[in-house]
């Protein structure tokens, strides 16, 4: 029996089940999508999903965590 029925030619969700929204960037720290992208993912066209997927790697620097310690605190003042 073949599973061809269940295979689709569309991007899978980038969700990694780490659903925490970064307070400044407003992006999920797990998948790097915006709240609107997460909400609308099921209704987006495959082409729109591919655009988002292609852009995700550029978003990682937007939520880079600062290192703790005195140096980090002093440099922010």
Image (tube, helix red, strand yellow):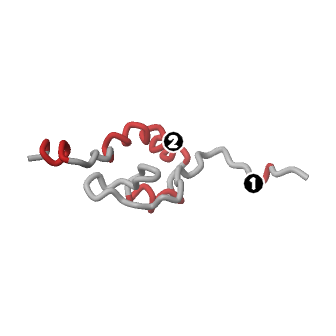
Mark 2 residue element: helix
- Number of residues whose C-alpha sits closer than 10 Å to that of mark 2, classed few (under 14), some (14–19) or many (20 or more): some
The reply, left or right, for residue 5 in relation to residue 55 is: right
Mark 1 residue element: helix
- Number of residues whose C-alpha sits closer than 10 Å to that of mark 1, classed few (under 14), some (14–19) or many (20 or more): few
In this rendered view, identify the residue nearer to me: 29 or 26: 29
Rendered location of residue 53, percent (x, y): 49, 42
Residue located farthest toward the front when viewing the structure as drawn: 70
The residue under label 2 is 50
Rendered location of residue 49, percent (x, y): 50, 47
Residue located farthest toward the left when viewing the structure as drawn: 77
Kindly indicate whether the residue at mark 1 contacts the one at mark 2 (C-beta within 8 angstroms). Answer: no
In this rendered view, identify the residue nearer to me: 63 or 14: 63
The reply, left or right, for residue 60 in relation to residue 15 is: left
In this rendered view, identify the residue nearer to me: 32 or 77: 77
What residue lies at 73% left-to-right and 49% top-to-bottom?
7
Q: Which label's residue is closer to the chain start, 2 or 1? A: 1
What residue lies at 38% left-to-right and 37% top-to-bottom?
58
The reply, left or right, for residue 50 in relation to residue 3 is: left
The residue under label 1 is 6
């Amino acid at each position: 029996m073949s599973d061809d029925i269940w295979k689709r030619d569309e991007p899978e969700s980038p969700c990694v089940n780490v659903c925490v929204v970064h307070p400044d960037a407003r992006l999920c720290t797990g998948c790097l999508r915006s709240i609107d992208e997460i909400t609308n993912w099921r209704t987006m066209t495959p082409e729109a999903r591919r655009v988002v997927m292609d852009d995700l790697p550029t978003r990682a620097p937007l939520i880079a965590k600062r290192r703790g310690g005195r140096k980090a605190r002093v440099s922010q003042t």
